[in-house]
């Protein structure tokens, strides 16, 4: 008989299972089969890590969930890596991304780049804006096809002498003849006669500029694509303030917690102008006109969608599970009577608009669907959110391969929502599209035995680990002919929180971590309400209702409410008096 390998590992080894383990030492990661080393790679070599762990799964030595638990990564990322290895082989993890060749510097592109260089924009910023590699632009400069804007050669002493203080700038701003802080008079005159497309940003040495700290956020704004897609979706006519300037003003205003356009009038326009490289920002009236042109003649929906797709592609591990929740923006005006919604934070039914936010596993927003009139979360999910996710979510398992046919339990992605969306019919409908649903169960009356609950370490998407008492059963909905997984958490007060899901692959602990991390979206709402005013209306204009929108007759709604109220009162009375039936004759009582 063959001798079995004893599960003996070198000291300091972390076990993946009884036979496979790994150890990190001197910047290297070593993988062991018992005491025998089988693989190694550099600690920072992510591609080799993905390949080796996938190879261990494909060879049958470990399970996908064991890799996820051992290394503290998401199960979905392990699953994607294994699928990639099976489809394309080892080369898929090490092939270089195809870049754009040198022929991208066409005559038209060279003119675009030169125009931006003349404005003093850096090569890296141009690379981000035009989606051209920075080395390609630098090669064009070296070969003489492009020319950088020459900088004045001054020493530090001269720069210091030119540096202005806030008091000096205020004095100069009040001396101008074209208005407060209008110091670039030539550019403003050229713009007024149509000889200037837009004023180029120009930064000068300055001290104690108000709120200049927001400039530290500029790299993050550009990295998140603030200007990357703007030219494809918006345009402004020639004028002093260009499209990029308007977008940067709005972005900086948001970072400064200016929650409405109207509040900008109370800020120092000259000082805010220094933040965007101009003499001053526009008046609120002008800013509103520019925004109206951008929104009416541009395509804000396409811009939002392009950015959402870009964010999903940059964070593939976070788009596998998406949080969906509604947030009510109350309306207290009298221009129209919007439908009433229950606002849980105020415990009142108020008129308003419901925004349905879609966030990733960490609570970061992807996009929002505003609905003035709707019949609830399920209808919005069916009609707008799910169709868009099916189109936009990248790297779905059915695109180009037959993973869904090979694995009957594999999903495209998962959506997590609260009890408002609980519906076995909807869950079956979504699983027909291979979309997993996670939600809380309604109307739970039974209690599971305490002995079923096991103390489990739950890892949340943000890396936090918490111990919970978890139990799991399978539940069959006979009417819908659907099996779901029912997972319960036992609290210290012996309350049982019930989760139902059509995710048939992930471990119960992973599902619990994803479900209870839904509060990250609630924290997002709280933060955005306090600091960014997402409850405030952008303007006070009214729009016409779409003729195809289905509405409930208000008179029917009122009568239906009365009937429901009467039935509820009748039910309570029947319960109170026990449905007494008097069958015998009632005899008069003698006194």
Image (spheres, rainbow, N blue to C red):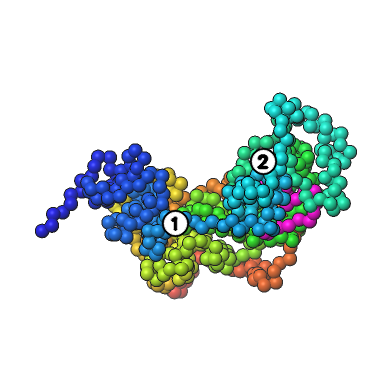
Any magenta on residue 235?
yes
| Neighbourhood count class around disc 2 (C-alpha, 10 Å): few under 14, some 14–19, many 20 upward | some
> Nearest the camera: 36 or 20?
36
Q: Which residue is found at the position 43% from the left and 45% from the top? A: 463
Q: Which residue is found at the position 28% from the left and 59% from the top? A: 60
Q: Badge 2 is on which residue? A: 256
Tell me if 106 is positioned left or right of 56 in this view: right
Residue 374 at x, y = what percent?
62, 65
On the question of residue 222 being in view, the answer is: no
Numbered tag placed on residue 95 in the rendering: 1
| Neighbourhood count class around disc 1 (C-alpha, 10 Å): few under 14, some 14–19, many 20 upward | few
Q: Which residues are magenta?
A: 232-251
Of callouts 1 and 2, which one flags the residue occurring earlier in the amino acid sequence? 1
Q: Is residue 17 above or below residue 178?
A: below
Residue 433 at x, y = what percent?
47, 69
On the question of residue 410 being in view, the answer is: yes
User: Does the CB distance between marks 1 and 2 fall below 8 Å?
Assistant: no
CA separation in Å, label 1 and label 2? 43 Å
* Residue 445 figure quarter: bottom left
Residue 166 at x, y = what percent?
75, 30
Residue 327 at x, y = what percent?
59, 54
Q: Which residue is found at the position 39% from the left and 64% from the top? A: 87
Q: Secondary structure at mark 1?
A: loop
Numbered tag placed on residue 331 in the rendering: none
């Amino acid at each position: 008989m063959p001798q079995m390998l004893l599960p003996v590992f070198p000291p300091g080894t972390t076990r993946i299972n009884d036979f496979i383990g790994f150890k990190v030492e001197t910047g290297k990661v070593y993988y062991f089969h018992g005491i025998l080393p089988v693989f190694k790679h550099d600690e920072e070599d992510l591609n080799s890590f993905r390949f080796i762990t996938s190879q261990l799964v494909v060879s049958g030595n470990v399970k996908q969930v064991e890799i996820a638990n051992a290394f503290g990564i998401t199960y979905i990322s392990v699953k994607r890596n294994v699928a990639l290895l099976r489809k394309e082989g080892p080369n898929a993890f090490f092939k270089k991304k195809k870049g754009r060749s040198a022929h991208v510097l066409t005559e038209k592109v060279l003119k675009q780049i030169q125009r931006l260089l003349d404005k003093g924009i850096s090569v890296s910023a141009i690379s981000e804006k035009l989606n051209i590699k920075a080395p390609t632009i630098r090669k064009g400069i070296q070969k003489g096809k492009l020319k950088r804007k020459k900088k004045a050669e001054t020493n530090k002493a001269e720069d210091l002498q030119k540096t202005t203080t806030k008091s000096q700038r205020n004095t100069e701003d009040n001396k101008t003849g074209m208005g407060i802080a209008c110091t670039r008079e030539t550019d403003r005159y050229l713009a007024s006669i149509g000889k200037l497309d837009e004023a180029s940003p120009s930064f000068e040495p300055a001290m104690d500029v108000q709120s200049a700290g927001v400039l530290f956020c500029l790299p993050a704004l550009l990295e998140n694509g603030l200007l990357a897609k703007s030219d494809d979706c918006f345009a402004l006519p020639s004028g002093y303030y260009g499209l990029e300037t308007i977008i940067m003003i709005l972005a900086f205003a948001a970072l400064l917690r200016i929650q409405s356009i109207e509040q900008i009038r109370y800020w120092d326009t000259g000082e805010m102008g220094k933040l965007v490289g101009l003499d001053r920002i526009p008046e609120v009236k002008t800013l509103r006109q520019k925004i109206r042109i951008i929104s009416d003649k541009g395509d804000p929906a396409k811009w939002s969608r392009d950015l959402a797709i870009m964010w999903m592609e940059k964070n593939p591990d976070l788009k596998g599970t998406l949080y969906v929740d509604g947030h009510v923006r109350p309306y207290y005006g009298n221009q129209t009577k919007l439908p009433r919604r229950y606002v849980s934070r105020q415990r009142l039914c108020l008129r308003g608009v419901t925004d349905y936010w879609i966030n990733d596993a960490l609570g970061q927003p992807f996009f929002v669907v505003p609905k003035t009139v709707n019949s609830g979360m399920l209808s919005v999910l069916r009609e707008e959110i799910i169709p868009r996710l099916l189109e936009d979510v990248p790297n779905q398992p059915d695109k180009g391969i037959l993973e869904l046919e090979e694995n009957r339990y594999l999903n495209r992605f998962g959506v997590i929502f609260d009890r408002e969306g609980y519906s076995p019919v909807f869950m079956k409908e979504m699983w027909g599209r291979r979309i997993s649903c996670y939600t809380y169960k309604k109307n739970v009356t039974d209690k599971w035995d305490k002995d079923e609950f096991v103390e489990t370490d739950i890892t949340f998407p943000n890396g936090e680990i918490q111990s919970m008492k978890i139990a799991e059963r399978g539940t069959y909905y006979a009417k819908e002919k659907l099996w779901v997984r029912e997972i319960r958490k036992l609290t210290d007060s012996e309350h049982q929180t019930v989760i139902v899901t059509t995710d048939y692959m992930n471990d119960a602990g992973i599902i619990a971590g994803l479900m209870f991390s839904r509060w990250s979206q609630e924290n997002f709402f709280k933060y955005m309400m306090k600091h960014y005013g997402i409850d405030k209306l952008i303007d006070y204009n009214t729009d016409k209702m779409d003729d195809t929108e289905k509405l409930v007759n208000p008179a029917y709604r009122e009568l239906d409410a009365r009937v429901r109220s009467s039935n509820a009162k009748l039910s309570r009375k029947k319960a109170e008096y026990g449905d007494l039936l008097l069958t015998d004759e009632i005899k008069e009582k003698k006194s």
